[in-house]
Amino acid sequence: MRIALCALDDELPPQEADATIARSGQTSRHHAWRDELAKTGIRGKGGQVLKFAELETLPDTRWLHCSGTIAESGERAVVSFGPEHAALEQRQVELAIREAGDLFPRPKLIVFCAFAFDPEAAKDIDAIRGITALRAQMNTDLLTEDLKKARASNQSFWLMGQPDVDLRQTKDGRWVAEVNGFDYFDTVKGELVSGGKSRIAAWALDTDYDQRSLFPRQVFFPMAGAKDGWNKLRRDIRAELDESLLTKLHGTVSLPFEAGENRTVAVKIVDDRGIESLKILRLP
């Protein structure tokens, strides 16, 4: 192998840029996702679709990847895409919101699109005030290189609801969690509206959430029929279950529980579309 050595004062001839770099990597994926989002919009509740009149790349931002207007209202919206092989994290939410505040005119809506959301990031998105912040689940088909190939579903982005959960303390000092449903973004009204309890397929309760991983200590199947849910699990695993609890474990009110060391409760809800959302609540 030969190695060419140059003196410090020698000039190297100008080299032609490799154009393949501009057509690959993170920027290329964001462009492909932007084009797909502009084409399909975001599927919401009851067949609603949040559609964009146009979407263009933002040149001077790192955490906001495109900007456009909502077709229905004409209001400005910005989009932040999560990473390809990891969950969208809390820091991205913070920095994207900071960038959105520096834009002029300031956007009315910010959409975080990701294949998975870190629980703390999801909590922060749901808590944002002053700008409407939404979460959209990205179809894993978008991980394929060719977005134009035929897919089982023509929908690439699904609007996620914000869980509506109440905590109350019982007379004996224990706690009870009640799931009231989802708050969905109504694309016609342009605001969050209650989705009710009828669309909750399953939900799980971690009574002592450690901020790292969810440990379901109670699991419920509100939409399960007589042969589904816990009854189906009992047949599949051939286990003996407490008959007195089966009815309660098909509802939307938890069993009473003691406050854990972390004094934090996490509720994961799955709606009838299979879309998951997480609500984190801290006990007084």
Image (tube, rainbow, N blue to C red):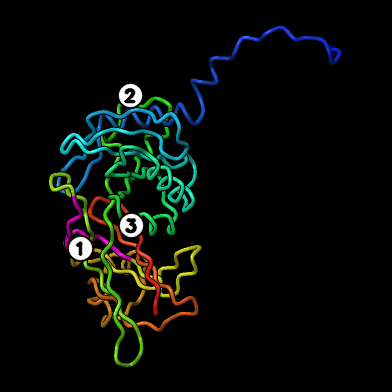
Using the image as rendered, state which of residue 203 and residue 264 is in the foreground: 264
Q: Secondary structure at mark 1?
A: loop
Q: Nearer the viewer, mark 1 or mark 3?
A: 3
Can the viewer see residue 1 in this picture? no
Mark 3 vs mark 2: which is more N-terminal? 3
Instruction: Report whether 29 appears left or right of 38.
Output: right
Per the image, the residue denoted by label 3 is 126
- The amino acid beneath tag 3 is Asp
Q: Percent position (x, y) of residue 195?
A: 17, 58
Q: Is residue 38 above or below residue 89?
A: above
User: Which quadrant of the figure has residue 33?
Assistant: top left
Spatial CA span between label 3 and label 2: 32 Å
Pick the quarter of the image with the C terminus.
Answer: bottom left
Say which residue label 1 marks.
223
Q: Nearer the viewer, residue 199 or 189?
A: 189
The residue type indicated by label 1 comes to: Met
Q: Quadrant of the N terminus?
A: top right
Give the image quarter of residue 47.
Answer: top left
Mark whose residue sits in front, 1 or 2:
2
**Rendering coords of residue 77 (x, y %):** 29, 39
- Check the image and report above or below for 235 versus 102: below
